[in-house]
Amino acid sequence: MIVTGELRPGAALPAERELAIRLGVSRPLVREALRSLEAVNIVESRRGAGTYVTELSPELLLAPLSHAFRLIHGSYLDLFQVRRFLEPAAAAEAAGSVGEDHLAEMDELLAALDELDEDTFPENDLAFHEWIVRQTGNPLLLSIIRGIRDLEFTVLEVTAASARNREQSQIEHRAIGKAIREGDPERAKAAMLLHLARVEDQLRSSAAGSPELAEETQ
């Protein structure tokens, strides 16, 4: 019912008894299915008010991905490997397909990053990278990137802590943006790879002086 659109985000689900009748299954099976849906943020139970479909945002649906990463003690270097697989290709795709109207949004994001403000830089950095992925027009890829957003933010709080690092990141962001604006997919891909590799090296260096972070980058 949720997949077909019969139940939209925010809609109340029928009572367990009605669901059991409509689906031709037992109430215990319905109850177990609802618990499974709640565990992956598709529905939410409200005490005394019933069960409702969540907003079904990519961030909410993919939140378990970040939890799984931490539970299996994933390395933040694994995170960078995933980004190296996905983001250079996204930058190349953006360079080959971005419209002139979307370039104005890119300019605004880069202008915000030019301020090099320690408090806002991580969020603006993530917004710029997400903008690139959005230009691919691939909702699944965008959902994956949004699903690891909080993990990326944790890294940025470390790597963007110094003014010099923020300045270098912005030089690299500008290079990526220039290649996208000029419609050069190969240069955009190379610039993104260079940026991610440099930030990964920076993370390794930061971990050397932080026992807690070092454990997370093993």
Image (cartoon, rainbow, N blue to C red):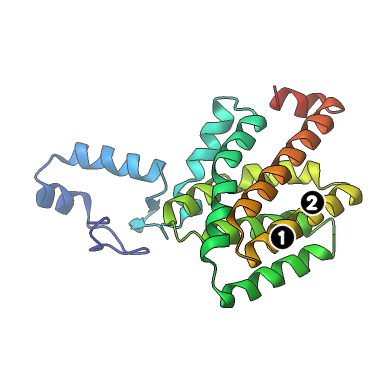
Q: x and y percent of residue 107 in the render?
A: 70, 71
Viewer-side label of 2, 1: 2
Mark 1 lies on a secondary structure that is helix
Q: Nearer the viewer, residue 75 or 136?
A: 136
Task: Give the residue drawn at x 57%, y 78%.
Answer: 101
Residue with the mark numbered 1: 124
Give residue 31's position: percent from left, percent from top.
26, 41
Please identify the residue farthest to the bottom as the structure is shown: 101
**Nearer to me, 182 or 164:** 182
Q: Quadrant of the N terminus?
A: bottom left
Left or right of residue 162, residue 8 in this image: left
Amino acid marked by disc 2:
Ser
Q: How far apart are marks 2 and 1 (CA)?
A: 12 Å
Q: Horizontal and vertical percent for residue 198?
A: 77, 40
Question: For mark 2, what is the residue?
Answer: 169
Q: Which quarter of the figure is the C terminus placed in?
A: top right
In the displayed structure, would residue 49 be above or below residue 162? below
Badge 2 marks a residue whose secondary structure is helix
| Amino acid at pointer 1 | Asn
Q: Where is residue 54 in the image (x, y as percent from the top left)?
A: 40, 57
